[in-house]
Image: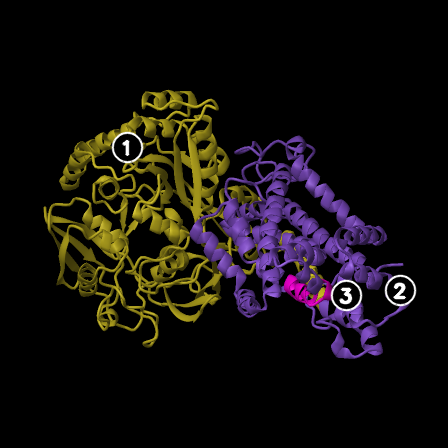
Amino acid sequence: MSAMKGERMSSPTDSSTDTGAGPDAGTTAGVDPAETAAATDAATGQPADASENAERDRAAVASTGAEPVATESLRASAATWRAFRKEPLGLLALAVMAVLVFVAVAAPLLAPYPGSYGDTVLEGPTGAHWFGTDSLGRDVFGEVIWGTQQSLLVAVLASLIAIAVGTLVAVVGAYFRKLDGPISVLVDLMLSLPVLPLMILIAALVGPSTTTIILVVAAFSWPEVTRIVRSQALTVVGLPYVDAARLMTTSPAWIITKHIIPAVTPVIVVSVVVTASRAVLSAAGLAFLGLGDPNTWSWGRILYEAQQSGAMSSAWWLTLFPSLAILALVLSATLLSIAYNDARNPKSRRR
Amino acid sequence: MKKTTRIAAVAALAASALALSACAPSAPPEAGGGEATASSETLTIATTTDVVNYNPLIGNSRSDYWITNLMYPHLLSIADDGSKEAQVATKWGYVDETTGYYEIRDDLSWSDGEKLTAEDVAWTMNAVKQDQPSGTFYGQLANFESAEAVSDTRVEIQLTQPDSSIVEEIGFWGNVVPQHVFEKADSVANFPNDGSDGGWVSAGPYVLTDVQVGQSYSMDRVDDYPLIEGGTPSSAKVVYRVFPDINTEILALQSGEVDVIANALPPAQVKTLQNTPGIEVEESVGLGYAHMTYNMTKPDLAKVEVRQALAHAVDYDAIRKVVLQDQAVSTGSSPLMPVLADYYDKSIKEYKFDTDLSRELMEKAGYTADGSGMFPVSFRLIYSLQDSVTSQWATLVKDSAAKAGITIELQGTERNTYLAQTNAGDFDIYAGNFAIMDDPVTNMTLAYLPDGAINYSYVDDPELNELITTASATTDKDEKIKLMQEAAAIVNENVYDNIMYTQNLYFAHSDKWTGFVSKPSELLSIVNPISVASAHLK
């Protein structure tokens, strides 16, 4: 996506001005938000096309105003929301996500916690058991409902940890150029590791629990976040308003928190969603391999137990419903991030 | 580019999610005719693991056992009640207290033409004693000193001390290997026997000829196999095919891709497959048990009341009814299972599921429950994730213990981790099972004597030790039974072991095949040499 957008974005600039002028525009990796487009134009000082004037002006304000960030982001988010409302897939994804969150929070109201065992084993969907029963006669509907809680918990916590670590490493690397080299090497190294076997190894050695799953997934997700955020932060650090900020303070922490992180926030928002959906997949994968938390219901555990009990060939309901739940969450998260990104980027907004 | 990747990933995910639930069996092909005599048919058997070790003297996986068992015969076989039957040996017993003997058949040959003689038998035993390969065979040789072929058909073994079980136990657990092949190795403990030196040599019904690791193991008929009627195995070829898990095995059987599933069926699948056209299910009597042991080196579990409290906090009926689908028999919480009819003692009763009694026992042991009714103890229960039945009932044990105010923390791990934890005593409660516990004296020696290999409760009770050692040297069967029943009562009272049930196993095969001979346990089941050699198309 990045390469495609990068090209699309830089082409009007390239056609009207010197190619070397835009800071990192063409090489920006990851997701490109509105700021990149605006910043590119502002930095080159060249008018791109009429539709971009507003953005350029906004960026000009951003680089000269005293505390422009809040105003800018307010106006930008309003524009983003206006654009987002025109994305039917995005709205649908948002609705699905909202339903999942509701299910997770309201689990105790929706279904009783699955007991130790039930009377009828491997019974297909009926009025009493909407999603059928498993090989110990437990209600699959209840398992899926309560599994939502654990799956979302893993998704949220693992992605928050990954985002926090990933962003911190990225902006520190981008701001302190001396650290950028080692950090880039570390990130490349982490990204080249065979993630699944390592996750299996660690989860197997440490022992299965929800905490283990969250930490393991987070540990292998932050480098991707760093990679995306770093490229964006590098662009921002080179902008005049950051130079201006340096005149106002000697505290890098202040500049990073007040100017750089807000500028990369849209990328982070997109990363959160993508990382969260990956976390759900990883957690389900680990649980399916028997490395999930045996004390908590998760979608992966339902699949794992179906496989273990040899019921996969005869009891389709055991695999269909948790698979659909995983599909719903990951698909809606992915569509949501695409829609948000499109809405955020004035170049690709629907008009 | 990234967008494409992401969409591809989403598509792949959707596909895999649907694939997981879209496994539909296809109808088996039409049945063909066949004779009970030698045919040109191939019998295809499904397994879930590769062969790790082709040397039958080394402890090994299921597939290792099934395949090497078709090549390296045992002196004795086992009946459904645990008693021993003739195989290579026709007669066996004791010359005096410290000398045992086997008379063996004179009509057996190795597939390369060499005769199988008493020399092979004696050499195998001596080599195992000397080289100590890790495995059950060596484990049975504690009181064994040496073996000697006194004639071509008679082997005599010298014992270091009187042992009334050893002749039968060595005869059943030990294979016979060809001396002229195995003696080339420095040690039988690390001889791979992988066929790299001109292939395999067999005295069973089949000989391994072709190995495709991860896929299949092909075996050809050995024409002269006098242990079955007619003297020639029925199928020309036996092929073991490797599948990822029991689900794919069931699908392969339903589609006619394989004729037999060697692995025992999960309890919940038995009824389904019994009602599936084209599939027959054979029962194999259980001769082992599933149990939990409480690690008595832990201060809490050293108290008998705590162990009793735990034992009364298990809903045994629910476990047998739901998890095992009524395919298991209660052992009466005794190591002398009902299947060992001579030894079984009806007066020893199963621990009653009574959480109130558990609470009383915990209070008696000096614990006080907190406001939420939980006692200040937590026990870590280990089990193998590869053992699906135990994994399922472990959850039931945890839930019912919670009702008695006792916290149990489940720790299911991959099999090798579990075995390492077991051997290191790294657990509070151990859950597992044994496939064949055929001889009470041998079992109790291993399970309850202080240095026993499977003494997972770390029990050392002088009274119990005395009973077991005395029984071991007793040749009078009635006396031996009496001593064992006394020992079992001590184990039961003190909860040195919590033996829960004997599971009867079920094995599925295509209804086009018949003539299988079912033997106890998953090791022998319907893939024991006699059964495989006798199976034929209807």
Type of amino acid at the residue the image marks with label 3? Ala
Quadrant position of the N terminus of chain A in the picture:
bottom right
Chain letter for mark 3: A
B63 up-or-down from B80: above or below = below
On the image, numbered disc 1 is attached to which residue?
B302
Please tell me whether mark 3 or mark 2 is closer to you in this view: 3
Crowd around label 1: few <14 · some 14–19 · many ≥20 (10 Å): some
* Residue A184 in which image quadrant: bottom right
Asked whether residue B524 appears in the rendered view, the answer is no
How many marks the image carries: the answer is 3
Q: Which mark is residue A51?
A: 2
Q: Secondary structure at mark 1?
A: loop
Q: Is residue B224 above or below residue B400?
A: below
Q: Which chain does purple denote in the image?
A: A
Q: Disc 2: which chain?
A: A
Mark 3 lies on a secondary structure that is helix
- Local crowd at mark 2 within 10 Å, few (<14), some, or many (≥20)? few
Which mark is first along the chain, 2 or 3? 3
Residue B205 position within the rendered picture, expressed as x and y whole percent measured from the top left:
36, 63
The residue identified by callout 3 is: A39
